[in-house]
Amino acid sequence: MDRKTVFAKKTNVKEVNYVGPSGVPLQNPQSYLPQNLVRKDLPLPHLGEADVVRHFLGLAQRNFSIDTHFYPLGSCTMKYNPKINEDMAKLDGFVGLHPYQAPHTVQGTLELLYELEQMLCEITGMQRFTFQPSSGAHGELAGMLMIRKYHQAHKRNKTKVIVPDSAHGTNPATASMCGYQTVVVESTLEGLVDVDKLKSLVDDETAAIMLTNPNTLGLFEEDILKISDMIHKKGGFLYYDGANFNALLGITKPALMGFDVVHLNLHKTFSTPHGCGGPGAGAVGVTDALVDYLPVPLLKKESGELFFDYCLPHSIGKVRAFYGNFAVLVRAYTYLLRLGSQGLRRVAHNSVLNANYVKEKLKDYYEVPFPKRCMHEVIFSCKKQKERGASAYDIAKRLIDYGIHPPTMYFPLTVPEAFMVEPTETESRCALDYFIEAMRQIDREISQDLDKVKSAPHTSFVKRVDETKAARSPDLRWRENGV
Amino acid sequence: MPYILNTDRDREEMLKAIGIDSIEELYSQLPARIKLTKPLNLSSGLSEHKTKKRVSALAKKNVPAEEFNSFLGAGCYDHYVPSVVPFILSSSQFLTAYTPYQPECSQGALQAIYEYQSYMCLLTGMDISNASLLDGASAFAEAVLMSLRITKKKKVIVAGIFHPEYRQTLKAYLAGFDFVIREIAEGTDGLVDTEALKQALDNDTGCCAFSSPNFFGLIEDAPKLADIAKRYGTLTVLVTNPISLAILKEPGAFGVDIVCGDGQPLGSGLNFGGPSFGYLATKKEYTRQMPGRLVGKTTDREGKCAYCLTLQTREQHIRREKATSNICSNQSLNAIGAAVYLALMGPQGLRNSALCSFNNTLYLYNQLKPLKKINLPFGPRIFNEFVWEVKNAQKIIEQLYRRNIIAGYYLGEQFPEYKNGILSCCTEKKTKEEIDELVGVLREVPGG
């Protein structure tokens, strides 16, 4: 098997002609710039085009992906990525646009953004959206900076942000980046925010609470209206981490639950591909109170013409250059057109149905720490399996041999040996049954052939990877002669 | 229903297995007050054919830059993207995989990102690079935060002409901290005023940032700026266009601490400004203060070479409120695209792109020089763009649009002192004829 890096595949091909000569006489920078500013040598390898294609397609084959494998990664909503989205994002009229072209030359794009904004406002109950944030965490940053600016403008002394103990790591990390102290509220034994404990934490210095709903345990926060009341009474805001919104599309709206700011991961709920870790898009919507603080620019329509309005004196400014990951937005827009109102509701229904089905079929094999009805994902604890010798980690690795991408493990941190399964609505019952059978089989294997589980995976391109070694002696780049 | 595979019968049987009668029961724990009683006010779903027609109609309302003779740059550059790049990035296993948390079934992504990291080190001359950040502006902000974290100081100096959107992004990222941003204006030559810089530097300064080529396209004496800054014990951050590094001195050779910027020129295309990716490369000793993901090389159980995400204790999912950044998703696919692009171009191809961009721009500069109505405020130490001034610049831009030419980026809105300024860019794609056309039209248009 070919394990060489691209650097070990260099050839003597030196002719590269992607763009012909421009007809302009060529000057060498050496003759023109001070010597200390000129580069002497550029140590990149030469490769032929066919070699490059073979190398990278060869690498691609060593990846699981949603197009090739069931990928029940909890909290990541790995649903099928429709192919029409790709075609639409690649249309010449979108790909070839420069961000600083005059508005009259990009009206189609502005119209798309305008319509997408209106659709997301309808879906969430928010007043306006920005598309600038390029990931969920980036959306959190934009949203929390808006909250911060609001409090400052209203001369409120706010110092802390409350997050549940089951929150995504990005929530507390974002609060820190906005200069807030993170206060953690514990969950009840049922897996929901402990409202009594929350009461003792909320005070005049509470800037906001950051919540996912359904929460990361896959459960709906039933006391959301009480929580919202409690926070709003103290002049705080509710931030909605929309990573788990799939379950509630067309069922309820974050605004109805009392949320003031919402980020939506378009690369999760709205089907855009995740590209090995990005690009995503973290659209952020806000209610009336916070509209003035949105990043610049905002879309504006005057006498039928759309343009970007930069005149927003209270804005937090910008969280990146230009307007966001536009090509991702085209995909999300396409998806929404395709599904429509009824389609979205069916997404929610089937995502919840699939998760509950998996839960029901596996609950006698793997412990379900929170018996309440789950939403889009279900948490198991592999505690019993661990006692028999195989950890959540071992079980996850063994799933690879069954051609299934492992679920999210050891998160939320509050569940021992956590195993977080999010099947999504785009999996068939047949695919779920295969997963269920694989999980039961692995449970049997733990009794019958423990070593097989503990030494998994066996069929993958590499065997179990030594992650400790990677961290102990970091090798983060290729070097000539390995030095 | 599109994309849903359960049949009515499946649903019925699954509900039965769960022990309930209807889908609505799945939502029984939601308070009635918050449940929608009416369908969302959106149109009904469209067939694939109709969806295609509708989205294509919007695309057709746009006029892509390529249909103009466009000289727009200003942070988003129209370099040629070889067909192989989008081809590789469309492969399902790169396009539709998640973050490579599980190394055994993600070796493709991991090795590709490791190669990307290596390429960025070779290009910048730095020790290490992360796996990408969201874009150039946020990478710049992260680099400043990283410097202040390392030095534990409060003041950052932003020297010379920066992209205005990078400055705005930095301000937003720093809003939650009690850090001080001190901006040093440019001298009359458009370059960092080194005397002003020396005066601004003091013991509270933890970071000194400059960009070269700067936003006006001018090449700073970056080694000298780095030297000055280092005398005050501050870290230096250099924002640069990665393609310029094919001909400009690699920053690693003159001791800059962090190099960052937007990787868009390396195969990302225009896309109305996104997605591209941010890059950040630094010295080995700062590895643990880096934001973002890192891929490392290790071995598997059988001792064979393998890759995995590493040093994750810097990151939010482990360190939570004490993480080096809140970043989670990055722009991996675009970073992999950059590795593919650099592999295709090789040293020769990349140098050609840089050299032709530089020469085309220089040619335009020299052609404009004799025109009386045009003022060139700065010298020709430029890379791929430069500033020129003309009376009624905004009007001239509008007039040229009607002749199918986009003259460049109008400076007056962000830089009021350059109310007649236009920033024009040439990449390697520009031809002599196209440049001559712009010059010819400018000769004709009234004004000046």
Image (cartoon, rainbow, N blue to C red):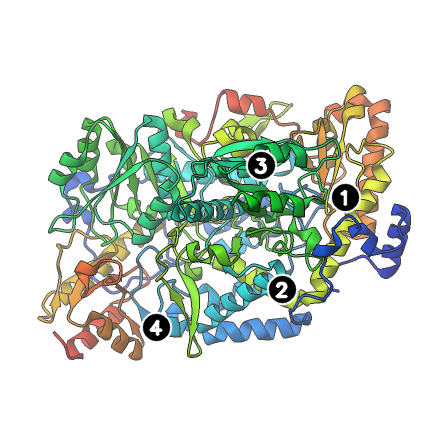
What residue would you read off at disc 1?
Answer: A374
The residue sitting at 80% across, 50% down in the picture is: B28
What residue would you read off at disc 2?
Answer: A336
Residue type (three-letter) at the residue carrying disc 4: Phe
Quick one: label 1 or label 3, which is nearer the N terminus?
A: 3
The residue sitting at 83% across, 29% down in the picture is: A443
CA separation in Å, label 4 and label 2: 32 Å
Q: Is residue A407 left or right of residue B7?
A: left
Circles 1 and 3: CB distance less than 8 Å? no
Image coordinates for residue B168, horizontal then vertical, percent: 33, 50
Q: Chain of mark 1?
A: A
Q: Nearer the viewer, mark 4 or mark 3?
A: 3
Image coordinates for residue A417, horizontal then vertical, percent: 71, 27
Quick one: label 3 or label 2, which is nearer the N terminus?
A: 3
Residue A256 or residue B147, whichever sits in front: A256
Residue type (three-letter) at the residue carrying disc 3: Val
What residue would you read off at disc 4?
Answer: B68
SS at mark 2 in the image: helix
Q: Is residue A398 left or right of residue A109?
A: right
Is residue A7 something one can see in this rendering? no
What residue would you read off at disc 3?
Answer: A163
Circles 1 and 2: CB distance less than 8 Å? no
CA separation in Å, label 1 and label 3: 21 Å
Residue type (three-letter) at the residue carrying disc 2: Leu
Q: Is residue A403 left or right of residue B254?
A: right
Q: Is residue B66 left or right of residue B19?
A: left
Circles 3 and 2: CB distance less than 8 Å? no
Is residue B33 something one can see in this rendering? yes
